[in-house]
Structures are given as C-alpha cells and as structure tokens.
Image: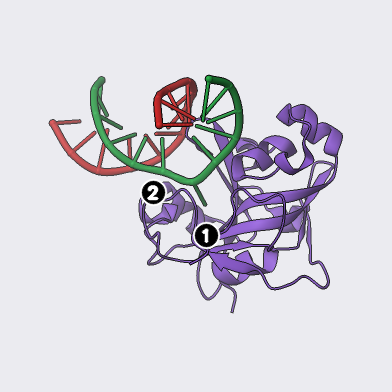
Chain colours: A purple, B red, C green
Amino acid sequence: MRSPIDCARGLIGCRLEWKGCAGVIVETEAYESEGDAACHTHYRPSARRFVAEHEAGTAYVYLNYGVHWLFNLLVKGERNGFVLVRALEPVEGLRRMRARRKRKNTEALCSGPGKLTQALGIDGRAHGVDVIAFRHGALAATEGEPEPVACRRIGISKAQELCWRYIRSGSRSLSAPPVIT
DNA sequence: TACGTGATTACC
DNA sequence: GTAATCACGTAA
C-alpha cells in the first residue's frame, strides 16, 4: 500500500530531526516515478538511476536554482517516487536555525523547502543517506493529528492539476496558503 | 516583480 | 562546446 501519496500524507505531523535540530512536518508534496511529468524521474536519467539503486527511506537532495537544497525522501512500494518536505514548525535547536537563517521570526525559519534545509544545515552531503535506518534524522508519528488538507503543488510547470501537496491546516509555518478551489 | 546561482540535460 | 530548464527565496 505504500506510495508517495500515502507517505506524503502520513508525514504530516511527524517530527523530523536533523543534527540536533527538530521540527514537525506541516507541508509535503508527492512525486511519482510513473505518470507524473513533474517528477525528476520523468526528465532526469540520474533520478531514475537513484530510484533503482537506493532503498526506500533514502534522502534525495538536490540543488535548485543554484541556491537552495531541497530535501526529499525516496518511496518504494506499490508505487515509487519521492516526498518533498516543504515546511516544518520548528521545535528544537531554534538558536542554530536562527543563526543559519539569519532570521529571528520562528514561523519564517522553516516555512519553505529551501528555508528548512538552510535552517537544519542539510546540503548535498545528505544525498543518498538512509534517513530511517541510520537515524541520522528520525521520524515519529504524532498522535491526534488531524487529516491533512490536499491542494495543488507549488512552483511546477508540469502536471499542475494534481492535488499532491499536503498541509497541516492552519499552520503558521506553511510556505504558502493552500489555494481553495 | 526581478533575478541570482549552479547542476543536469539535450543537442550541436 | 551552448542553451534551456528548474519542486526557491529575497529585496524592492
């Protein structure tokens, strides 16, 4: 039953730890290897190779616009693909996050995919690291988490109609409000 | 709203 | 070799 969509939904409310910092995931997006024109596997041979050669739970990290590292988790199961982690509510290591981000406002520390990697100190060295098994970062479900809200993904030019972005409704740490349709 | 910045890729 | 594209963030 495991698929990028299931995992993207399930990660909402989970705690993400990285090198002494931690936050609760409040925004994710699912990307599917097959039939999703926005997924890297659709236009990058290196991404297809990555899926073939790595286990589920491996971090897929890449540089976007030459500036921002984006943090994904590899999903393998009934369907293969990635979950892009897009925003966190900061919980632990706020001092270091503020220092790395050069921002004070708590909501602005991890409210975007590039912001959270900067806040946590994630970069290309994390690419290919097995997040689950090595517990370099750890994930643990939160109890009483309400159902995530689904809406369109952000910042893509292909497959814009798919509602594969998931958010914790009402969070103040989102990268952008959901578009109501 | 403009644009920096660099990896990846396709195509000479 | 060149050029296009890109799952973004910031200042203005």
Discs 1, 2: same chain: yes
Residue A179, numbered circle: 1
Give the image location of residue A3, x and y in percent.
56, 71
Residue A44, numbered circle: 2
Q: Earlier in the sequence, mark 1 or mark 2?
A: 2
Question: How many marks can you see?
Answer: 2
Seen at 70% across and 43% down, the residue is A110
Give the image location of residue A102, x and y in percent.
73, 26
The Cα atoms of the two marked residues, 1 and 2, are separated by: 29 Å
Give the image location of residue B3, x and y in percent.
42, 22
Q: Secondary structure at mark 2?
A: loop
Residue A13 lies left or right of residue A117; in this view the side is right
Q: Residues within 10 Å of mark 2 (few under 14, many from 20)?
A: few
Q: Is residue A58 above or below residue A68?
A: below
Check if mark 1's residue and mark 2's residue have beta carbons within 8 Å. Answer: no
Seen at 84% across and 38% down, the residue is A94
Residue A37, numbered circle: none
Q: Is residue A128 above or below residue A66?
A: below
Using the image as rendered, state which of residue A146 and residue A10 is in the foreground.
Answer: A146
Using the image as rendered, state which of residue A88 and residue A169 is in the foreground.
Answer: A169
Q: Quadrant of residue A29?
A: bottom right
The subunit letter for the residue under badge 2 reads A
Residue A178 lies left or right of residue B7; in this view the side is right
Residue A146 lies left or right of residue C3; in this view the side is right
Q: Amino acid at mark 1?
A: Val
